[in-house]
Amino acid sequence: MNYRTLGKTGVQVSNICFGAMSFGGIADEDTSKAMFNRCREVGINFFDTADVYTGGRSEEILGKLIADCRNDIVLTSKFCLPTGKEVNARGMSRRHMKLSVEESLKRLGTDWIDVYFVHHFDSETAIEETLRGLDDLQKQGKILYPAVSNWAAWQIAKALGISSKEGLARFECIQPMYNLVKRQSEVEILPLAESEKLGVISYSPLAAGLLTGKYNAGAKLSQGRFIEHEGTQQRYAEQIYSEVAERFNKHASERGENPASLAIAWVMANPAITAPIIGARNMEQLEPLLAALNIEMTQEWRQEISALSITPPPATDRTEEVV
């Protein structure tokens, strides 16, 4: 296992982060325990969850699993998405943040969360309000590092500017979507992260399973993100994504590599990425994901794989100036 520094925090994290979104849902408690133990066996010390995952069960199960190794684990969780029917049980307000972090700490059975993410952007709440709340939580020792997921680069940059001006705890880590068919992060988010020395733990390295080849034309499946989640179907509905996945699977076959392993290795080889987040519903799914650790991805090989998809245009759209 290789370990990388999370942004400029000095904290060392495994170069793969395990996402516990399946815990308590498609993965029962015994399966969750088996996957957790396997991750620890290979040296993973970085685990990601959220208050809304499986209605809080993900945090509860993960909390039990880390009980005897808490000091060895770098733990993340998130708040912002609706946690109930009450009108204020959502968003980036300090009120919802305070209630959310207290409930997460109880479910996780810990006194602190290492990296605490704002899960989404909330246009109804001033960024300053959220940053002051996160600064309070850091001062109270309930979180160590504020972080943000699913924000645009301009929103992250604005928040960093406010933090610097007001002397508040800044975002130290971001969590964008990033995979071979969804490369928008390369335009502004990842360059911003490199410039500001932010940790990056990207999600969906397999494009919700599209890059594994299991959704090829004619495949008959009864389960999977594409079948179970309408939002995922919409996210990858464009034909070009399936075409890229088909080219990628052909390439993986020619190289004698499992496409799931190779897709993760491609993400890991981006120098802006601290650790991609992997997730699985069972041990059978987990093993090829961990096998990405054994792939030696050269710069030339990564460029070859990148050429199988469409490189997004630069932020200025002046493609003629791209070297």
Image: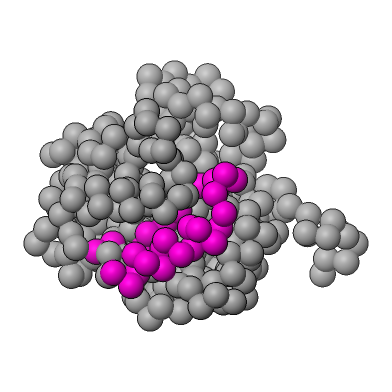
User: Within the image, what quadrant is residue 283 found in?
Assistant: top left
To which quarter of the image does residue 146 belong? Answer: bottom left
| Residue 171 higher or lower than 286, as above or below | below
Outermost residue, right direction? Answer: 320
Residue 141 picture location, percent across and down: 27, 70
> Looking at the image, is 301 positioned above or below residue 257?
below
Along the viewing direction, whichever of 60 and 180 lies nearer the viewer: 60
Q: Which residues are magenta?
A: 112-140
Query: Which residue is drawn at the image coordinates 56% and 58% (left, top)?
Result: 127
Residue in the image at 62% along x and 71% along y: 161
Say whether residue 282 is visible: no
Residue 133 visible in the current orientation: yes
Looking at the image, residue 9 lies above or below residue 183? below
**Looking at the picture, how far across and down is residue 43, in whole percent?**
25, 66
What x and y, as percent, mark residue 76? 33, 58
Q: Quadrant of residue 193?
A: bottom right
Quarter containing the C terminus: bottom right
Q: Is residue 97 magenta?
A: no
Q: Is residue 127 magenta-colored?
A: yes
For this orientation, the residue located farthest to the left is: 68
In this image, 4 relative to 100: left or right?
Answer: right
Q: Quadrant of the N terminus?
A: bottom left
Q: Position of residue 197 (x, y in %)?
A: 54, 76
Q: Is residue 169 above or below residue 263?
A: below
Report the residue at 42% width, 61% height from top: 133
